[in-house]
Structure formats: structure tokens, C-alpha cells
Image (cartoon, rainbow, N blue to C red):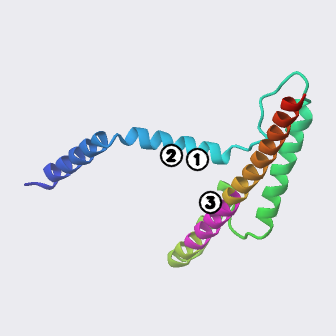
């Protein structure tokens, strides 16, 4: 059997397996869960009584402050231009590879910290809303 035929059979077997276990459902659940955990709890739709511009500016400032905090402790390139300038330099290939691995590990660590911070913030906001809803329910039952 040739390599091409083996590859085709393997791809067909994987595709058949994915269809049998309904992988698309699991993927949809995974994406929905990720979206719920990442979306801030305070990201409410705009209503007529809220000052959306002030909220948007405050959120933008909060994001900007987080990015500045992250960038302060990092030596890795942050833009494509900085990365290309570093790549065009006279740095040996093995050292460049080491730098790329180091920078990737650093960025993944930062991503994990931001993700866990966002999840914790969402949990705190959700707990506050749940407590507020509970208080409103109790007040409505009494009144």
C-alpha cells in the first residue's frame, strides 16, 4: 500500500470517527463555554438609562492599563515589525530559536494569567448579581 493510500484511509477513518461521536456538538459546547468564561459579566447591552460612552471609555482604559502592566515586564517583541527586525538581525539561528521558545512560553504564561483573572472577575461579578437578585426577590416577596 502506498503512503498516499494510507494517508487517505487514515483521514477517512478520522473523519468517520468524528462523525460517529458527533464532534461538532462537543466543539460547539467547548466554544460556548469558552465564550461564557471570557466575556465579562459587566458587558451588558446598552439601555436608554445608561451612559454607554462613559462605560466604553472606562472599559477601554481598564484594558489599556492591563496591557501596559503586561508589557512592562516583557522583553519580547510586541509588534510584527519588532519581530521582523529581530529576525533580520545577525542573531544565529539556534539563538533565535531559543528566543522564540522563550517568548512563546512567556506569552502563554501571560495569556493564562489574563484568562484566569478574567474568569475570577466574572465569577465575582456574577456572585454580586446573584446576591442582588436574591435581595430583590426577598424584598418583592415581602412587599
Q: Mark 3: which secondary structure? A: helix
Residue 63 appears left or right of 31: right
Residue occupied by mark 3: 84
Q: Earlier in the sequence, mark 1 or mark 3?
A: 1
The residue positioned 65% from the left and 55% from the top of the image is 80
Residue extent of the magenta highlight: 101-114
- Looking at the image, the residue that sits furthest to the left is 1
Q: Earlier in the sequence, mark 3 or mark 2?
A: 2
Q: Mark 1: which secondary structure? A: helix
Most frequent secondary structure within the magenta stretch: helix
Quadrant in which residue 103 is drawn: bottom right
- Cα distance in 3D space between marks 3 and 2: 34 Å
Q: How many marks overall?
A: 3
- Return the x and y of residue 64 as percentages of the image width and height: 83, 51
- Return the x and y of residue 36 as percentages of the image width and height: 63, 43
Quadrant of image for the C terminus: top right
* Mark 2 in CB contact with mark 1 (< 8 angstroms): yes
Labelled disc at residue 88: none
- Cα distance in 3D space between marks 2 and 1: 6 Å
Considering only vertical position in the picture, is 74 above or below 22?
Answer: below
- Looking at the image, the residue that sits furthest to the front is 142
- Cα distance in 3D space between marks 1 and 3: 32 Å
Residue 69 appears left or right of 106: right
Labelled disc at residue 34: 1
Residue 29 appears left or right of 115: left
Considering only vertical position in the picture, is 82 above or below 139?
Answer: below
Q: Mark 2: which secondary structure? A: helix
Amino acid at each position: 500500500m502506498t503512503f498516499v493510500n494510507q494517508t487517505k484511509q487514515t483521514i477517512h477513518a478520522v473523519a468517520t470517527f468524528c462523525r460517529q461521536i458527533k464532534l461538532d456538538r462537543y466543539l460547539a459546547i467547548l466554544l460556548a463555554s469558552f465564550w461564557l468564561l471570557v466575556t465579562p459579566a459587566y458587558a451588558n447591552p446598552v439601555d436608554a438609562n445608561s451612559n454607554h460612552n462613559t462605560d466604553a471609555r472606562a472599559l477601554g482604559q481598564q484594558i489599556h492599563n492591563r496591557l501596559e502592566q503586561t508589557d512592562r515586564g516583557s522583553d519580547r517583541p510586541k509588534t510584527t515589525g519588532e519581530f521582523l527586525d529581530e529576525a533580520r538581525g545577525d542573531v544565529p539561528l539556534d539563538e533565535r530559536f531559543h528566543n522564540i521558545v522563550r517568548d512563546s512560553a512567556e506569552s502563554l504564561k501571560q495569556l493564562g494569567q489574563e484568562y484566569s483573572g478574567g474568569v475570577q472577575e466574572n465569577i465575582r461579578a456574577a456572585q454580586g448579581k446573584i446576591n442582588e437578585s436574591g435581595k430583590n426577590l426577598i424584598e418583592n416577596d415581602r412587599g
